Amino acid sequence: MRLEKLVIAGLGALIAVTGVFSAEAVAQNEQFIPMLVYRTGPYAPSGIPVANGFRDYYTLVNKRDGGINGVKVTFEECETKYNTKLGVECYEKLKNKGPTGAALVNPFSTGITYQLIPKAPVDKVPILSMGYGRTAAADGRVFPWIFNFPTSYWSQASGFINYVAQQEGGLDKLKGMKIAHVYHNSAYGKEANPTLQVLAEKYGYKLTMLAVDHPGQEQKATWLQIRRLKPDWVFMSGWGVMNQVAVKEAAAINYPMDHFVGNWWSGSDADVIPAGKGAIGYKSTAFHFAGTGFPVHKDIIKHVYDGDVAQANRNNFGEVLYNRTLVNAMFGIEAIRTAMQKYGNKPMTGEQVRWGLEHLHITEGRLKALGMGGFTRGFEVTCADHETGGPIIVQQWDGKKWNMVSDWVPTMRDVVRPMIEKAAAAYAKENNITPRKCMG
């Protein structure tokens, strides 16, 4: 009896030890990605679909693909309320988690991105600020740790002007036109201003810039100015509750909604639905399509929601910002996969992922293999160019859904890239940075 107890105890100990070793082995084969989210506060209408999109794509990669080349993706949410101070605290809390630390960080806030830029080379955690953040970071010679592909705020602003010119019959028709920029009075909202000013001088349109203070619920004075000014076009750089208020105010003064174009952070479902019929005709830029008509969406229903479409819909499935973070999460995962091609199929360090981001080449064939063919466009990152200056597309709200109403509109790289290089050089001088030399 005593011998039997000893054997059982020994087996129990062996199982316990084996279980510990097994758990450790699993933990060592995980790639950790922090999630800075804002499910609460005045920006929650924008933040919730963003958080859900990231979560669902990472879950899809694990369930459909078995992880990234066999390495499981793990993630943890930290609530920032779109507050820069809280965002930095979240980053500090999560940056060292996982067997190799954070693979990369998606701040999803220009303010937070600005604060993390000097931390990235010290902590060796690359920043993926997809389509936002400091535009000058597109110059990889000065900002090797920051990536803002597939296009930046400055490129987007130039694409908007190109779109207006297309609608009006040519760039020469811009002379004498009145264009207003209604923008969130923050680092984010101000980003487009330099480009709009340069292009106003180049093409002769009259630019009026109207700032809206945080969080953007009071805009009566702004739209009274719009009513008096009667601009030919209005461009908006808004976020959260500011957007829906602006759309309502524009409708209230009977501004022609098909000449009111939001940037890609001002064109989500939450921005237009509260305005009801008044929002019909409103437009915004984008760099991916809306809706649920792509194979990746079918994969998410199957693998993430076990076929429960109703549950998926409750999680903003297919909404613009949900789709945007599917694209964002995919870019990050593919950068990690690219890094693995050089360093092996194991959890990557932030430094290795930085290499993967800088060598990322999203081909049309790869998009198709991921269920995203036609959903967005491919691009190739280089050492010097972390943005790629990709084109934009314009979508329009019909009262029920977003429809694409343009072809891909090119950006003005000949104007924007010299601005980027000048701004990056100034930043380098101010911060005693010696720019890298990039070959080719």
Image: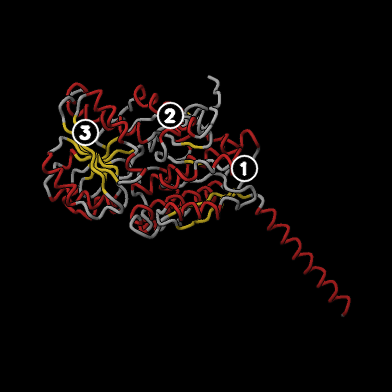
Badge 2 is on which residue? Answer: 388
Q: CA distance from mark 2 to mark 1?
A: 24 Å
**Residue placed under numbered mark 1 in the picture:** 349
Q: Going 64% across and 40% down the picture, which residue do you hit?
A: 345
Label 2: which secondary element: loop
Q: Residues within 10 Å of mark 3 (few under 14, many from 20)?
A: many
Q: Assess whether mark 3 and mark 2 are in contact (beta carbons under 8 angstroms).
A: no
Location of mark 3 (residue): 207
Residue 228 left/right relative to 245: left
Looking at this view, is 323 or 412 the one in front? 412
User: Sequence-wise, which precedes: disc 2 or disc 1?
Assistant: 1
Q: Is residue 70 left or right of residue 414?
A: right
**Secondary element at tag 3:** strand
Q: Position of residue 313 (x, y in %)?
A: 35, 56
The image's mark for residue 115 is none
Look at 17% across and 50% down and name the residue there: 221
Report how far apart the C-alphas of labels 2 and 3 lie in the structure: 27 Å
Q: Return the residue nearer the eye: 231 or 54.
A: 231
| Mark sitting earlier along the chain (2/3) | 3
Depicted 2 relative to depicted 257: above or below: below
Q: In the rendering, at what x and y percent does residue 251 appear?
A: 15, 49
Question: How dense is the environment of label 2, judged by Cα within 10 Å: few (below 14), some, or many (20 and up)?
Answer: many
Q: Residue at x 24, y 25 (%)?
A: 201
124 left or right of 377 in image: right
- Dot in front, 1 or 3: 3
Coordinates of residue 298 in the picture (x, y in percent): 41, 48
